[in-house]
Amino acid sequence: MPPREVVTLNAPPVHQATTVRADVGRTFDVFVREIGVWWPVEPFSSGGDRVRDVTMERRLGGNVVETWDDGTTHVWGELVAWDPPHGFTMSWLLTPEPTEVELSFRPLGAALTRVSVEHRGWERMTEEQLGGACALPEGYRGGSYVRGWGMILARLVAHAEGGA
């Protein structure tokens, strides 16, 4: 019997970034402490309009959780790296196979912060999973995660800068 050939899919990480007119401490705190206020649960959640809160257990090993109107909770992932206010990395369980999201917060000045996202681990998925719909149509292959993280970061900016 010939050896089984392992095929590695070309599925590079998704990168997205934005600049926030706030210092790094405030920007990080808005992301992790106020996520339930600004995160666009429509369409980026399991429960949609049933979601009443999104919370982060702000520690290594802590969970990121959405809570529904009936008290049901759904874990989005676990914090696998925690370095406030510079960043964190979490497992991401809202994809067909677990992936990983790294958020970096870099001060660019006294009141300016660069927020970068790297969403990786796509090579764990099948081609069908990569092309399937998620919160946005067309899946990973159609650029929905790039668009999605752009929308999420835009909401972060609006809230951190006082416009949300």
Image (cartoon, grey):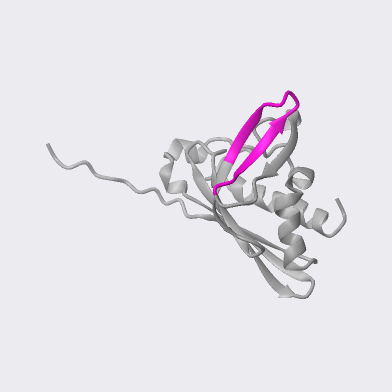
Residue range in magenta is: 61-76
Q: Residue at x 52, y 49 (%)?
A: 100
Q: Position of residue 113 (x, y in %)?
A: 72, 68
Q: Residue at x 56, y 41 (%)?
A: 139
Please say whether residue 48 is one of the residues in the magenta stretch.
no
Single out the residue that lies furthest toward the right.
163
24 shown above or below 3: below
Q: Position of residue 99 (x, y in %)?
A: 50, 46
Single out the residue that lies furthest toward the bottom.
109
Is 100 or 8 nearer to us in this picture?
100
The quarter of the displayed image where residue 17 is located: bottom right
Residue 103 visible in the displayed image? no
Q: Residue at x 45, y 51 (%)?
A: 11
Residue 93 visible in the displayed image? yes
The quarter of the displayed image where residue 30 is located: bottom right
Q: Is residue 79 left or right of residue 111?
A: left
Q: Is residue 96 left or right of residue 32?
A: left
Q: Position of residue 42 (x, y in %)?
A: 73, 37
108 shown above or below 74: below
Total count of labels: 0
Name the image quarter holding the N terminus. Answer: top left
Q: Is residue 119 left or right of residue 9?
A: right
Single out the residue that lies furthest toward the top.
70
Q: Residue at x 78, y 57 (%)?
A: 157
Identify the main secondary structure in magenta.
Answer: strand
